[in-house]
Image (cartoon, grey):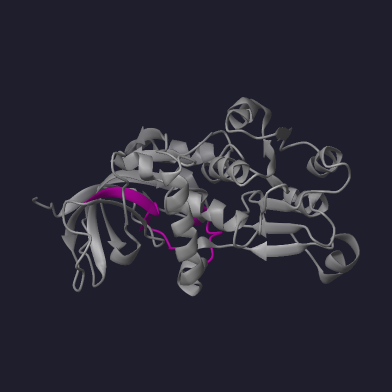
Amino acid sequence: MSIPATMRALEQTSLDGPGDLRLITGAPVPDPGPGEVLIRVTAAGVNYVDVSQARGTFAGGPRPPYLAGIEAAGEVVALGEGVVGPEPGAHVVGVAIGGGAFAEYLALPAAGAVPVPEGWADEQALGLVVNWPTALAALRPLGGLTAGQTVLIHAAAGGTGEAAVRMARHYGATVIAAASPGKHEAVRALGADHVIDSRGDIAAEVLELTGGAGADLVLESAGGAAFGASLAAAKRVTGRVVVYGLPGGEAAITNWDLVYAHQVHVIGLNIGVLIRTAPQVFGEVMGEMSALIAAGVLGPGRPAVHELAEGPKVLAELEARATTGKLALQP
């Protein structure tokens, strides 16, 4: 396959948000470095990380101007030095946290390039390396979820939330899913036992549904005022709150809070850090996820696919929490 010198891509020109994302046509096609593969992108996943980077709130994020997007699937077209696989022609999905996925070509770490499951279209594999392992890590090795426990899942209509609802039900948990009212039917269809208004009194509703006990586990991806509600909704002493998102903004918690107000376990999750510093745990997560796919608990994704040029609009809608499910851009 002939690889062009330039490509179409979305470039973030400021840290003022998705409105300053611009479609350019002369971006240089990257050369795969040592340990990397070059893929021809067929679908790029849209994640809240992209919004955080565009706002400058993502720790260690790229500085503008930069090519946006961290997740992509496509066909391997070239190998960097020292790479023996995947071979050219293989279809993979992977993450490049430094950006560049919203483009026609992307260089990915070969070690993190996951094969697209047989029979799946490339866009259906989006989520395999971001949303699904985040949900599973939060539920199991970090959250310690077991059958019979109750879990509160924020942003249950999003890409990670949807996967978490499905998996939690599979593990025998009672699922309380928080979402805005317009998304309640979609969340119920996933199998949630209870669906509550994410803009209401979350703690009060969870306590009522649990007979005053609180949730055994809270998947906190909302941030802002919802963070305090998550702490209040968790069971005293044994309750766990796994924090992996903050679209609502930062929230403070003090040692006084943990001693006198919220006697709970607070656990931070960043999937990139987990991969780098606890590869054994991440390997266990991916192995368990493969078993869930084989068992039919997780199947081919059904992302809403948009043209690359619609990227600024799609990210703005994601930031405004006006979207449901996984989102993708097609170069």
Location of residue 309 by image quarter = top left
Residue 63 is left or right of residue 141, and the answer is left
Location of residue 112 by image quarter = bottom left
Front in this rendered view, residue 40 or 233:
233
Residue 69 drawn in magenta? yes
Residue 132 is left or right of residue 73, and the answer is right
Is residue 254 among what the camera can see?
A: yes
Location of residue 193 by image quarter = top right
Residue 242 is left or right of residue 27, and the answer is right
Is residue 244 among what the camera can see?
A: no
Residue 305 drawn in magenta? no
Q: Is residue 197 above or below residue 285?
A: above
Residues in magenta, as a range? 53-75
x and y percentages locating residue 165 in the rendered image: 60, 41
Front in this rendered view, residue 17 or 89:
89
Q: Is residue 187 above or below residue 4?
A: above
Residue 99 is left or right of residue 149, and the answer is left
x and y percentages locating residue 57 in the rendered image: 56, 59
Image point 75% across, 49% down: which residue? 225
Image point 20% across, 74% down: which residue? 82
Front in this rendered view, residue 252 or 179:
179
x and y percentages locating residue 311 in the rendered image: 40, 40
